[in-house]
Amino acid sequence: MNSYGHLFKVTLYGESHQEAIGVIVDGLPAGTKINEELIKKDLEARKPKHIGTTPRKESDHYSITSGVFNGLATGSPIHVMIKNENVVSKDYAHLKAHPRPGHADFVSEVKYKGFQDYRGGGRFSGRLTAALVVAGSLAKMALPFELTHSLKQIGTLKDMTKLDDYILDVQNQGNSVGGTIEITVKNMIVGIGEPFFNKLDAELAKLLFSVPAVKGVEFGLGFEGIELLGSDFNDALVDEKGNTKTNNSGGITGGISNGNDLKINVFIKPTSSIQKAQDTYNLKSQKIETLDIGGRHDVAIVRRIGIILENVVAIGLLDQYLMYKAFL
Amino acid sequence: MNSYGHLFKVTLYGESHQEAIGVIVDGLPAGTKINEELIKKDLEARKPKHIGTTPRKESDHYSITSGVFNGLATGSPIHVMIKNENVVSKDYAHLKAHPRPGHADFVSEVKYKGFQDYRGGGRFSGRLTAALVVAGSLAKMALPFELTHSLKQIGTLKDMTKLDDYILDVQNQGNSVGGTIEITVKNMIVGIGEPFFNKLDAELAKLLFSVPAVKGVEFGLGFEGIELLGSDFNDALVDEKGNTKTNNSGGITGGISNGNDLKINVFIKPTSSIQKAQDTYNLKSQKIETLDIGGRHDVAIVRRIGIILENVVAIGLLDQYLMYKAFL
Amino acid sequence: MNSYGHLFKVTLYGESHQEAIGVIVDGLPAGTKINEELIKKDLEARKPKHIGTTPRKESDHYSITSGVFNGLATGSPIHVMIKNENVVSKDYAHLKAHPRPGHADFVSEVKYKGFQDYRGGGRFSGRLTAALVVAGSLAKMALPFELTHSLKQIGTLKDMTKLDDYILDVQNQGNSVGGTIEITVKNMIVGIGEPFFNKLDAELAKLLFSVPAVKGVEFGLGFEGIELLGSDFNDALVDEKGNTKTNNSGGITGGISNGNDLKINVFIKPTSSIQKAQDTYNLKSQKIETLDIGGRHDVAIVRRIGIILENVVAIGLLDQYLMYKAFL
Amino acid sequence: MNSYGHLFKVTLYGESHQEAIGVIVDGLPAGTKINEELIKKDLEARKPKHIGTTPRKESDHYSITSGVFNGLATGSPIHVMIKNENVVSKDYAHLKAHPRPGHADFVSEVKYKGFQDYRGGGRFSGRLTAALVVAGSLAKMALPFELTHSLKQIGTLKDMTKLDDYILDVQNQGNSVGGTIEITVKNMIVGIGEPFFNKLDAELAKLLFSVPAVKGVEFGLGFEGIELLGSDFNDALVDEKGNTKTNNSGGITGGISNGNDLKINVFIKPTSSIQKAQDTYNLKSQKIETLDIGGRHDVAIVRRIGIILENVVAIGLLDQYLMYKAFL
């Protein structure tokens, strides 16, 4: 239940406060050049450093223990491990009785019958996404497409030049804020994706919703397209390569890439952990009580999440691209 | 590539103008009572009949050729076939050169190298969703949850009492319109879904995006939640059953059902086929030309799509519910 | 649980006495020429006609309801249906209490809690293999390899010129007999199969054991190789194409095809249904009683099973061949 | 391509001479007690120590980096890593031109286009099976069944009291020998396995053939049953629990466990590496040349392989047992 993919398979493991997190990446074509600079750059983009991100630091040193030889993929599974270093050994046991609002503490307690590792969010910690980022970096090394992402909106703010001030204000209120990220894929080709269930948009949506805090995914115009009539929404073909006059469909028609840029818009909810005290039900005392989570958390995880979203898109694209190649 | 599911598996076949469409449903627990009234009711809800839906009629007579004995599921795969009856034998061959805007004609021509059955949209026809509806009806027979759907907005119209007038107006312009559907699942339990990749929201999003014309999916508040701060967005637990004061997360936390109602909002793009003439590229003449699709099409497929969305959610829920049971 | 394959997927349905059996074949490359003569020839090879095969006849008329256009695969799922025609409406209900030795009556009753369709063996009937044969015929149309099978031994008989007499003798005793079939694949290439879990031999063994009555599978020399020392067992490479001096490994090294012919030997147990009376436990009376199955059955199903085995090998090979192509 | 399982999933990584090998085990039920003594005992059973096993030693120290908390499974993936310690840094590069008979050197060179890590057999090394053993040990902790294995025959020797002498003799010839292992599972229940493709015997055969050197798998009497007629082969039911008078079917009927002991017989080919010089084709010189592998290898890997076979059976059984539970 922790694996994704058909030909390019990604299997994640790890919990926030155990020895390590990591990932097995299976299906990177033999001979793919391993670009360690890209891995480092992508991990760096995920790290907290801007205003509004957590002061907790993890070095994110990774080790590749298999599947790479002379700097090239061998065709065998690649295992990448990242040790958990900055683990504070404080007592988290009280969270079992006192689930944090917005977090998976309660569902986890019920689903795993109390056996889950509850420390630091355990399996549900954003920490896991570091391994996911590396898997995506590896995917990008074998993809002929070009992926980027950008922050479109944060809370009510659409003008990104005022970002730091806006976040500082939210931080001073002891609160948190969400936002939207746009992912773009250029140099696409026609024909990636399958007509049912394995549609390109269906697979990418599944991957994007696998990233913690994602609560909405739309392609092209998305929900904004509701006010358009068909004659305006339809993208008119203008050449034999598949280029269209507009790109309201976000580069996907019938679940299959149409050769135009992929355009995906993702909504990230406000970070669940906030400084402010909040009400929650105490499972032991059986009363609603006020909970003060404390600690210092990301005010706006949306500032760091873009690279994770970009990289899960890369994972999905490589998987589908290999399937496409099988039928050439 | 036309199958979905781990323990409850759905495999679709069919093309618009071939002999039949159908579905194999595998994993309906032995002894499940087959409620044929529900199948008929669900198929009826998908049929065109309201203003703005196509005048083309299909009887949607289905036959169950296996897997049911004495009115109960045997535990073997259930095959349901629906013959294509109302097939007009007109010539569709020109569409190969002249791809319809918004349709999969072009991507299909490229991906299948011209070998696809292009008649009536072939594999990409909305016709296929009749079989999908039946699969969902079967899933609902084994689910302890209660699913409903409702039309929330159509084009710019939010007041559904004015629906017929609004659609008639669009129809008179020879145009089409999209909208949003909300799906609600009541009587949920805590613990359905897996922490990564097989998150409940990830699987449901994949299924929803598998339905033609879906271009956006959000859970709970979704994109509207962008203006809320964390203290307002977080749902506060109020009892030991998992009930929360608000339900901004739409009943899913960390990818796992939290016991509150599921709330999913889906955006449906305007129907691609319109009466109005449109520009498209002619692959033969290698020029942009005007295309008049003709025929009479759904002005607002969003009026018929709700039951399809509801039923794919049922498919996903039963699959995850069986997985949940495996670990009880 | 009734599907096989990664890129070439086969999903079976049907029970002996329901309306139809059939198969969905997904992943046959678009443009593959559909050779109906091959389907008919393969179905014919499975039909009872020789001495020792059942006098019950099924026409095995099949219909392809989707996925083929102008005699070529469209790239969409191909649904093939075979109606159950020769269904005798006698009462099978007593078999629920009185399970036939060697048959799945008892396990089926327990596993499906009595809800299974028990008539004629239901889901466990050899009838299902007709659909499997068609799936394999379709696979062979897209494979560059050449598959054959031959009967090697039947009971104690190794000289196939005496086959009819031998079987007649067993038939006169009201008994049944098993045997071994050898499958050979020529024109193989190097590199089909994956190093772990999806090894070529592992996948083919899984498919072969999916065929009712198979109780043993070996590659190359198989169990007979036990008396050889390594120096005799090892196949020595003699050229750069992968040809080896001997072929004791049956064309597979490390789970991957080595370019030599595949050689697979399969053991088929004696047909479970025999004319002779047999003891079994009566679940109702709770006593061991004598059961007389009656009817006229195959004395030697091994005479008809070769084409089924050959064709499941084709299914596995096409699936792996497409995977191989994805990484070229 | 390096994963197995539906609900209990095992994903392997590693190559003989890279930093580590390991496994992710996903789906061990939360709360399962982790019995480290069993892991150590099983790893010990795989270690070379008897006459005829390699003098190369690996400590097989493993570390569990995730998924276990307070000695119990958390329900998250369990990652187990085993470092490669005893790696001799000699030059293996000549093996690329000079493939060892019986080994995967040649197929690997072709399939991975020369990019494979060829040192010590790379991905094809028996080394990988240490991680597989641990996965099986974990599976056994959650299984209510009892697994054992025994050596039945080695070369021509059936009397195991003369084992050491027999192997010593083969060793003195610079040669190697194969054999057969029997796996037995007691305390089985009725109903494990699915009627098609996921039959219990089909899944177990797939897993067994995934183990290097396995060349034959049979259930119950297997190939020896060829001389029996149906009346002798059929197992007669003697009570309502499923017990049968004989167990010629090896505990599986119609692909489903019938409540009797599982009996599986596996043929292991002679170890490929031998002291004797052998002919092979030199891909560089393009001539057949004599190759002296040197080193000291297992004379009879069959002495160590039993625990690996037993444990892959455990993996398959737990996966199917969880599926069985989903439909209770």
Image (cartoon, coloured by chain):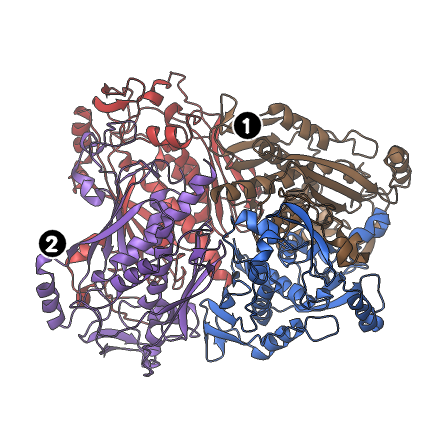
Chain colours: A red, B purple, C blue, D brown
* Residue D313 percent across, percent down from the top left: 64, 41
Please tell me how crowded label 1 is: few (under 14), some (14-19), or many (20+) other residues with Cα within 10 Å: some
> Which numbered tag is attached to residue D64?
1
Residue extending farthest to the bottom is: B90
Kindly identify the residue that appears in the image at 91 percent across and 41 percent down.
D173
Q: Identity of the amino acid at label 2?
A: Lys
Of tags 1 and 2, which is closer to the observer?
2
Q: For this rendering, which residue is in front, A1 or C94? A: C94
**Above or below — where is B8 with respect to A243?**
above
Chain ID of residue with mark 2: B
Mark 2 residue element: loop
Circle 2 residue: B158
* Residue A29 percent across, percent down from the top left: 53, 51
Mark 1 residue element: strand
Q: Tell me if D249 is positioned left or right of A258 in this view.
A: right
Chain ID of residue with mark 1: D
Q: Tell me if B94 is positioned left or right of C304 in this view.
A: left
